[in-house]
Amino acid sequence: MARKVLVVDDEKLIVKGIRFSLEQDGMDVDCAYDGQEALDLIQKNEYDVVLLDVMLPVLTGFEVCQQVREFSDVPIIMLTAKGDDMDKILGLEYGADDYITKPFNILEVKARIKAIIRRSNAGHSHDENPKLLTYDVLKVDCDSRRAYIDEKEVNLTAKEFDLLELLMVHPNKVYSREELLNTVWGYDYPGDVRTVDVHIRRLREKIENKPSDPKYIHTKWGVGYYFQK
């Protein structure tokens, strides 16, 4: 079954080039040229990956990403023309899974898309792990990739879910930021450990009653993070 990708950029030549290259690899590609059009397509279709430019008319890429995260955990790769680290972190703050800085090499784009699809597929394979993880009022269903607090679903991004699942499957094991980056994002991910800190903070805001005094995900200062059970 062909992988379905949405490419969003207001520069039509860029979209045309990416679309052609992805279709050469057998992918099914939809295109959008502004933020609202992208949001409408994501609401109506199931995509394996969304390639989303930051600077878009109508709605910015950040606004699209933020709204998509209210109803979907589809993997999102942000395209940014700015090399500033804060812009990259900001993209991740809004729930993006990865980013690529323009100008980019199309081979890099294809490699990132394939890596995210591989990791997404791997995240759905849990034969060796428990299907249901529970602790106190927190429940994680590994098959459906859903998390609940007091039976109320918590909307997690793909990466937030992967982090939570990994930590819960290995309670009290302290993972360094580098280990989490390599395990959840992959060795080929070009970002740095701040990506992990951003995602852990967002995860705590969603599952902890008091994020500043966490019950589940704890920090081992100078080392990393662990799930306390």
Image (cartoon, grey):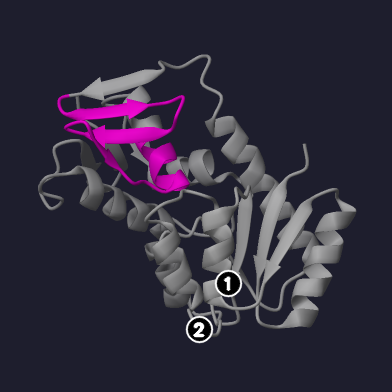
User: Looking at the rendering, which quadrant does residue 166 occupy?
Assistant: top left
194 horizontally vs 100: left or right: left
Tag 2 secondary structure: loop
For marks 1 and 2, give the CA distance: 9 Å
The reply to whether discs 1 and 2 touch (Cβ–Cβ < 8 Å) is: yes
Where 202 falls versus 58 (above or below)?
above
| Residue type marked 1 | Glu
20 horizontally vs 191: left or right: right
According to the image, label 1 marks what residue? 37
Q: State the residue at coordinates (38%, 31%).
A: 165
According to the image, label 2 marks what residue? 58
Q: Position of residue 184 (x, y in %)?
A: 49, 41
Where 38 falls versus 213 (above or below)?
below
Tag 1 secondary structure: helix
Closest to the observer: 188 or 37? Answer: 37
| Residue type marked 2 | Val
